[in-house]
Image: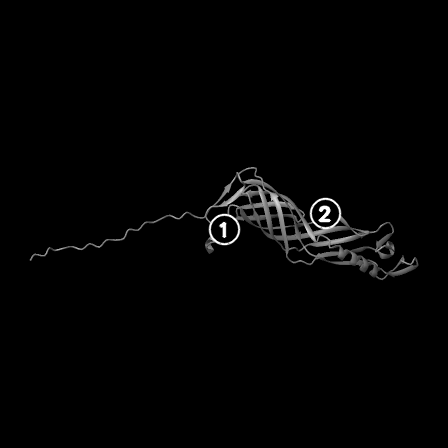
Amino acid sequence: MVVDDAEVYEVEPVAVAYQVEPVAVAYNADAGVVRNTAGAVVGGTKSFFKTVTHPAAISAEVGTLGYGANLGWALNDKTELQAGWAGGDVADLFGGDFDVNDINYDVDTDFSNPYLGVQYRPMANWFTMGAGIIVPDNEINVTANAEGSFFKIDGIQYNAAQTGTLSGTVEHRNKLAPYATIGFRPNITNNFGLFGELGAAYLGKTDATVRSSNPNADVNFTNAQGNPDSIKGSEVAEKAQAQLENKDYLEWMPIVKVGATYRF
């Protein structure tokens, strides 16, 4: 019997390489949306740090929270994460004064409002809805204006010259203030756009401090029974302080702001 010799050949496996496209963010000029085409903020560590250091947009703003700016990162084609700061002296935006019962107070402010929030475009167009958290550190100084020659508190007129200057501070109790807004973000060019927002932030109840420049002086007044009486200047300040604290000035901070955005 004849057996044919046979040769055995080893077949190598075939490998096919595919090129993976890098993460990219595109901008839809018609809808005004920053589009994240392959995933952005959430991913690997390398992708995360690359995204954080390469925001999709930068904005400048002015409004009731102050003068400031923010950076934006695309989460998807309808949602953008924002981190920003607004502050400065914005008392004039509130009229520069306010009334507490019968006393008018001049206001001087120094605001600092860092915030983190999300802008959402429910219809993928220029209309936006926003929400987030503010970390308020706002300095509010007040000075009482006398009504003629008196400070009128709880219906009693206290001699203003004897009381001296009534001045103090107002501080909100909330260390974190939630906010919500609605707005619009029309585009001028592919890279440049404008925006406006309306809303409110809950800053919480207030703690007030009022001092008299003549704390130890005798202050004359006519009591509820129509008899002449007197108290110390510091006591007049305490009465004004109680009224001011009950006012809860800017417990709900109105948010009105406009600005401009540049998209990379």
Dot 2: what SS? helix
Q: Around disc 1, counting alpha carbons within 10 Å, would you say few (fewer than 14), some (14 to 19), or many (20 or more)?
A: many
Relative to 263, does residue 219 appear above or below in the rendering? below
Dot 1: what SS? helix
Q: Nearer the viewer, residue 115 or 255?
A: 255
Q: Around disc 2, counting alpha carbons within 10 Å, would you say few (fewer than 14), some (14 to 19), or many (20 or more)?
A: few
Q: Give the left or right position of residue 261, taking residue 222 as reference.
A: left
| Mark 2 vs 1, N-terminal side | 1
Q: Residue furthest left?
A: 1
The residue pinned by badge 2 equals 94
> Residue 42 in the image: x percent, y percent?
49, 53
The image's mark for residue 254 is: none
Amino acid type of disc 2? Phe
> Residue 87 in the image: x percent, y percent?
66, 50
The residue pinned by badge 1 equals 51
Would residue 67 be seen by someone viewing this image from the given angle? yes
Q: Residue at x 83, y 61 (%)?
A: 235
Q: Give the left or right position of residue 217, taking residue 180 as reference.
A: right
Q: How is the image coloured?
A: one colour
Relative to 243, does residue 96 appear above or below in the rendering? above
> Residue 121 in the image: x percent, y percent?
56, 45
Q: Residue at x 68, y 52 (%)?
A: 111
Q: Give the left or right position of residue 230, taking residue 93 as reference.
A: right
Disc 2 and disc 1 in contact, CB within 8 angstroms: no
Instruction: Give the CA separation, mark 2 to mark 1.
Output: 38 Å
Q: What is the tally of numbered marks visible in this picture? A: 2
Amino acid type of disc 1? Thr
The N terminus: image quadrant: bottom left
Would residue 264 be seen by someone viewing this image from the given angle? no
